[in-house]
Amino acid sequence: MFDHAYGSYMKHAYPADELMPLSCRGRVRGMEPSRGDVDDALGKFSLTLIDTLDTLVVLNKLDEFEDAVRKVVLDVRLDNDVVVSVFETNIRVLGGLLGGHIMADMLKAQSVRLQWYKGELLHLARDLGYRLLPAFNTTSGLPYPRVNLRYGVLSPNSRTGTELDTCTACAGTMILEFAALSRLTQETVFEDTARRALDVLWEKRQKGNDLVGTVINIHNGDWVRRDSGVGAGIDSYYEYLMKAYILLGDDTYLERFNAHYVAIMKYISQPPLLLNVHMHNPTISIRSWMDSLLAFFPGLQVLRGDLKPAIETHEMLYQVTKQHKFLPEAFTSDFAVYWAQHPLRPEFAESTYFLYKATRDPYYLQVGKSIVESLNEYARVACGFAAVQDVRTGRHEDRMDSFFLAEMFKYLYLLFSEKRDLPLDIDDYIFTTEAHLLPLSLATARPPCPRNMTVQEIFTRSCPSTQTLFPNNPTFTRTIRDAHKQLLQPGPARARTVLSLPPQQEASPLGLFSLKFITELVDPPAGEQPGISPLAVQVISPPFFGRVVLTAGPAQFGMDLTKQEHGVVLSEPYQACAAISNWKEVQGKMALAQRGECMFATKARNLQEAGASGVIFIDNAEGSCSEEMVLFQMVGDGSTGNIVIPLVFLFQKEGQVLLDALSQHRNVDVLLATKPMFLGEEKTDQPLSASQLHEAATEILEAVSPALQELEASCPVPPVEAAPRAWKKWKCCTPTVYCSARVTVCRVETQLPKTSGTFMFVIWRKGKVAFSC
């Protein structure tokens, strides 16, 4: 598998940064359509090759490693005029160069090969470190999210330096690479700079509960997004506190990690789930979905020695992967797909490896086998492995990120190999968040593992031991897993209550709470609306007059929805990832743009600059619709404060309704609102009660029943004598297909004794009626 992936990159893509496995060519920044912030990882420095260096050694491909080192030394340039992500360049390129240097030095010392090597990779790493340092030139010490490799941040030619904020992980995931660089070069500026950024994040935590937010202002240290979790935006900040203690031997990092960990287990952990909370009000979860990046957390819990919650969460993740073949980019608390992509992320394999290493339970070998089988069956293509655009359909995406080679194959190989098969003692190294290997010998004062400690002290220190955690009890892991194993049952993708108490055993309050929580995944409490409140795109121009109402999803950025009418126009280019060519037509209109190729925020900025009054994004997944999919909130890129137009998202089938209307009628006006407004609808301060709605509905149904009996599937206009006298107008549209149901939509204006106004009926094929009023 590795040979196929790496060989495809070297044959079809090198020296490009990444392989496009469907096109069988390299992805060169500026030569392919922009994907927005995703492309900030690309710096024209043969990213995949550098990211893969120490993986070649772990997999015992020493000839290929020596050849790769030669290529990096001879071909890679770092003074490119390109704006890159500070975070991604640090973990992938700086980490890759350091890992490669450490492996080359080790092999040279063993007289195995590379006798010609004279530290060239370390020289490149030092060069790159100094190119990243200008990003930290802020009043707070927190780094800018991007830097120009040639011109830095504040130069007139840098094309960056205007950002106001960054994510917590982006600022807090520098210490391992920067400290290693300092200790290998004897230049302390790197470690000091990364340490200062960590100090700021620690100081800005919510001191009442030790939680941090997701996005922070890099100038004044104010929190921009205050949701707190262990997934995207925060994940590797926690990881690096723990690993900085292991690598560098400084108790300060462990003390900070433990404070955060206590807060995580108190507020965020709801075994087996990990749900985001508000950092200032952490007793309530603020969203009902989880992102796939949190899959690293069980592995981190293993490092801390807290195996029980690690096993629980990992088992939940495994059940999700078994249902969807891969771990979706995000999934709901009842394990349905929330974001359907899977870019071949390695975090689940990482946690599987750590759990197997800690427990030696062969169950985790079976989990690893399932990962291998899914990759081979559903991701392998002729030129490598392709990311999955939609786990429900299996549709591929033309990308194979460098982390797939840097992490996925490393963890899978280590999972199935024995220590004697490796060219190094893996226990002498710590993994960075990109799985690069840094030697524990870098520590200046690394204390021995603690002995003769209390149970509580064991769980607050490093160096976990399986004998200490569950001595002479090989069924320990199975007992924990079995409590969560059947959360997913055949049928609809919803959680099932499977926890039961043994007979004649008194339930603890914690046990009852866990049982109640799992039950509520099936039956939410009364009055609670699960998920995201939908918005509405209402087509109000003739001949629709508000009868077409499309369910839309919101954005976490942009301004509130307007209640004014807007004409709609198709963006050119349709993806809106580049400058808008039809800006004259877009000005003052609601622009339609397709999802994909770049971030929502990039599209919004381009259309806002072109003068659009708002944006309606349309999904690029064929056949998606709101009745079958879970609505989601579009997220920004950490720098969305300058986006001030309203934004909504339509799934493909709802979007196609709007596109068809635009092609047939040219001038189409829409209204964006939190709920639709129907013609003839009287404004009232108080909504109708349930009994009033039922009375009105009964009256309407009684009035239309005679005519409905005359309706046929072709939707003929009923004879005048068949229509109730109270009807002023009857109009039938052409039968249409909405999602998977063929329906006829009819509009009726009535003046009934108790109810008057405009009503819409959906006539189903079997004559059943659904209505809204």
Image (spheres, helix red, strand yellow):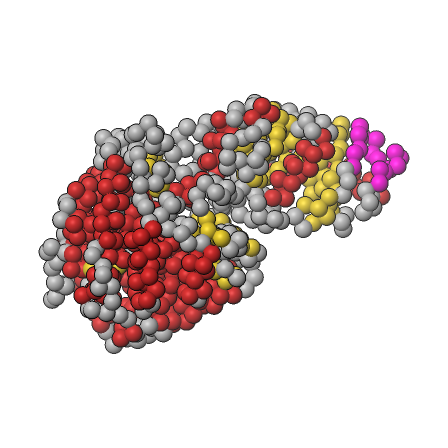
Residue 348: x percent and y percent?
39, 60
The answer to whether 232 appears left or right of 375 in the picture is left
Residue 299 placement, left or right of 752: left
Image height of 440 relative to 609, above or below = below
Q: Is residue 217 left or right of residue 323?
A: left
Using the rendered view, name the quadrant where residue 636 is placed. Answer: top left
Q: Is residue 577 magenta?
A: no
User: Measured from the top left, where is residue 741 in percent x and y?
Assistant: 69, 49
Identity of the residue drawn at 20% across and 69% down? 111
Q: Residue at the location (12% across, 66% down)?
A: 451
Depth check, front residue: 333 or 568? 568
Q: 710 or 310: which is nearer to us? A: 310
Q: Where is residue 494 in the image (x, y as percent from the top left)?
A: 51, 57
> Where is residue 96 drawn, in percent x and y?
30, 54
Q: Which residue is located at x 22 percent, y 72 percent? A: 467
Q: In this view, does 117 lie to the left or right of 74?
A: left
Quarter of the view holding residue 317: bottom left
Residue range in magenta is: 716-732
In the rendered image, residue 725 lying in the magenta stretch gets the answer: yes
The total number of labels drawn is 0
Q: Nearer the viewer, residue 689 or 120?
A: 120
Does residue 678 show up?
no
Residue at (30% x, 60% y) in the render: 54
**Quarter the C terminus occupies:** top right
Q: In which quarter of the image is residue 154?
A: top left
Q: Is 574 above or below relative to 560?
A: below
Q: Quadrant location of the N terminus?
A: bottom left
